[in-house]
Image: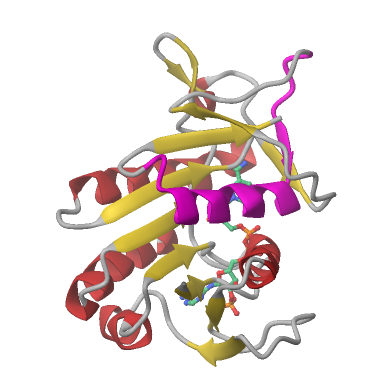
Amino acid sequence: MNVLLLGASGRIGQRTATELLDRGHTVTGVSRSGTVDGIDDNEFVAVVGDATDPDHVAMLAAGHDAVVSTLGPSDDESAGRLTEMVEAVIEGLRRADVDRLVWTGGAGGLMVGPETMLVETDDFPEEWDAIARAAIDAYDRLSEASGLAWSYVAPAALIEPGERTGEYRTAERELVTDEEGDSYISMEDFAVALVDELEEENAVHTYLGTGY
Ligand SMILES: NC(=O)c1ccc[n+]([C@@H]2O[C@H](COP(=O)([O-])OP(=O)(O)OC[C@H]3O[C@@H](n4cnc5c(N)ncnc54)[C@H](OP(=O)(O)O)[C@@H]3O)[C@@H](O)[C@H]2O)c1
């Protein structure tokens, strides 16, 4: 596939670019800086783009088979920038007539009990509250988008650089935990999950949790 990867320079984005390229896809990697470290591949091009600008997103997306987002606001930006991004991406894809989007979401909106989301639990770190709620807002925006085959793929509660095992589990709208009750996935395996969803389309119009 010819894939537009929004947020390619980020921690999850770089690993997703590598996973896509290793599987033979062609990747246009977008970030505001326009540089992506550590990738040297003839099927990859890094470009400058602003994911809060629907015209820019439309121009970048044109001619691609699908868009994968690993976008996130910088540390110095408000969590609300994520809402600007999802709105611009939905509108930009509509204008470019691209109808497939795999979006990196957040674990905060995943259910940990019959009526409780992870973000609502007492132990949820205060400093992650705003970005977790912005990520839930992004899910709500996608849910309302018509004519778009979106998949919202969320990491486990904890995601860090690690190993690519190729193994992970998924659950629809639920936090994935291991036998000890820990919710974890490496960034490498999360990238595998994103690309699996892109290729297999098992979770279109779904909020998918991932983890071990
Ligand atoms: N447990 C969880 O739920 C969990 C944990 C970690 C991450 N996440 C989510 O996963 C996503 C990615 O996380 P990450 O750690 O990989 O983030 P990151 O390292 O900060 O990467 C964010 C990427 O977005 C790009 N970006 C930001 N604003 C942009 C704009 N206006 N236009 C174009 N590109 C823009 C950045 O590049 P430039 O700055 O160069 O533009 C960078 O490539 C985030 O949405 C984050 O909230 C969820």
Q: What is the quadrant of the C terminus in the image? A: top right
* Residue at far left of view: 146
* Residue at far right of view: 163
In this orientation, which residue lies closer to the viewer: 55 or 38? Answer: 38
Percent across and percent down for residue 67 are 41, 68
Percent across and percent down for residue 134 are 42, 48
Relative to 46, is 151 above or below?
Answer: above
- Observer able to see residue 88: yes
Relative to 178, is 64 above or below?
Answer: below
Relative to 7, is 61 above or below?
Answer: below
Residue drawn where x is 29% and y is 70% of the image: 88
In this orientation, which residue lies closer to the viewer: 173 or 78? Answer: 173
Residue 200 magenta: yes
Using residue 69 as the reference point, say whether residue 16 is left or right of it: right
Question: What colouring method underlies this structural image?
Answer: secondary structure
Query: The magenta stretch spans which residues?
Result: 180-203
* Residue at far front of view: 24
Residue drawn where x is 60% and y is 41% of the image: 155
Residue 116 magenta: no
Q: Quadrant of ligand 1?
A: bottom right
Residue drawn where x is 61% and y is 67% of the image: 20
Relative to 8, is 179 above or below?
Answer: above
Percent across and percent down for residue 68 are 47, 64
Using residue 173 as the reference point, say whether residue 119 is left or right of it: right
Percent across and percent down for residue 161 are 80, 53
Displayed quadrant of residue 46: bottom right
